[in-house]
Image (spheres, rainbow, N blue to C red):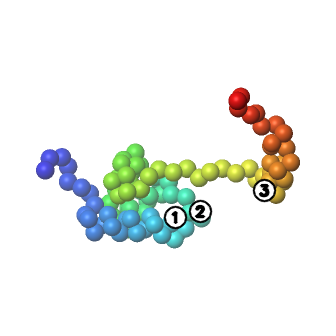
């Protein structure tokens, strides 16, 4: 096998997967959002291995994780009002396909 040997053993990789699945709040963060800097800190703290944050997306992909961004929702959004607008106005303003 060529290249540099892996920094994490298979056992450490499984441990990291379990830590990530438990969520960022279980790791001591205020929100449940995983970021590369947070993951690097957890790997350093829990497994004693240093990774550069720019490499972590590649490591996470190898572990079966994908990069995801939380959907943003306006604080002012009122779901009831939106539902009423759709029921009342959407059909009226929706363009129809030509026959």
Locate residue 96: give its quadrant. top right
Q: Nearer the viewer, residue 10 or 36?
A: 10
Report how far apart the C-alphas of labels 1 and 2 lie in the structure: 7 Å
Report how far apart the C-alphas of labels 2 and 3 lie in the structure: 24 Å
Q: Of callouts 1 and 2, which one flags the residue occurring earlier in the amino acid sequence?
A: 1
**Residue 35 in the figure: left or right of residue 82:** left
Q: Of callouts 1 and 3, which one flags the residue occurring earlier in the amino acid sequence?
A: 1
Q: Residue 47: image x %, image y %?
A: 34, 66
Q: Of callouts 2 and 3, which one flags the residue occurring earlier in the amino acid sequence?
A: 2
Q: Nearer the viewer, residue 22 or 4?
A: 22
Secondary structure beneath label 3: helix
Q: Would residue 73 be visible to someone looking at this image?
A: yes
Q: Residue 78: image x %, image y %?
A: 81, 55
The residue pinned by badge 1 equals 24
**Residue 82 in the figure: left or right of residue 63:** right
Question: Quadrant location of the C terminus?
Answer: top right
Label of residue 79 in the image: 3
Q: Residue 32: image x %, image y %?
A: 56, 63
Secondary structure beneath label 2: loop
Question: Crowding at label 1, few (<14), some or many (≥20) Cα neighbours within 10 Å?
Answer: some
Q: Is residue 44 above or below residue 82?
A: below
The residue pinned by badge 2 equals 31
**Are the two marked residues, 1 and 2, in contact with CB atoms closer than 8 angstroms?**
yes
Q: Residue at x 47, y 50 (%)?
A: 67
Question: Crowding at label 3, few (<14), some or many (≥20) Cα neighbours within 10 Å?
Answer: few
């Amino acid at each position: 096998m060529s290249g540099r040997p892996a920094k994490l053993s298979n056992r450490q990789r499984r441990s990291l997967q379990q830590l990530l699945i438990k969520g960022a709040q279980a790791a001591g963060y205020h929100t449940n959002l995983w970021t590369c800097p947070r993951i690097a800190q957890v790997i350093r703290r829990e497994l004693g291995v240093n990774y550069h944050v720019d490499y972590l997306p590649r490591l996470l992909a190898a572990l079966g994780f994908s990069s995801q961004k939380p959907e943003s929702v306006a604080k002012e959004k009122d779901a009831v009002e939106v539902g009423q607008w759709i029921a009342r106005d959407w059909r009226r303003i929706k363009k129809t396909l030509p026959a």
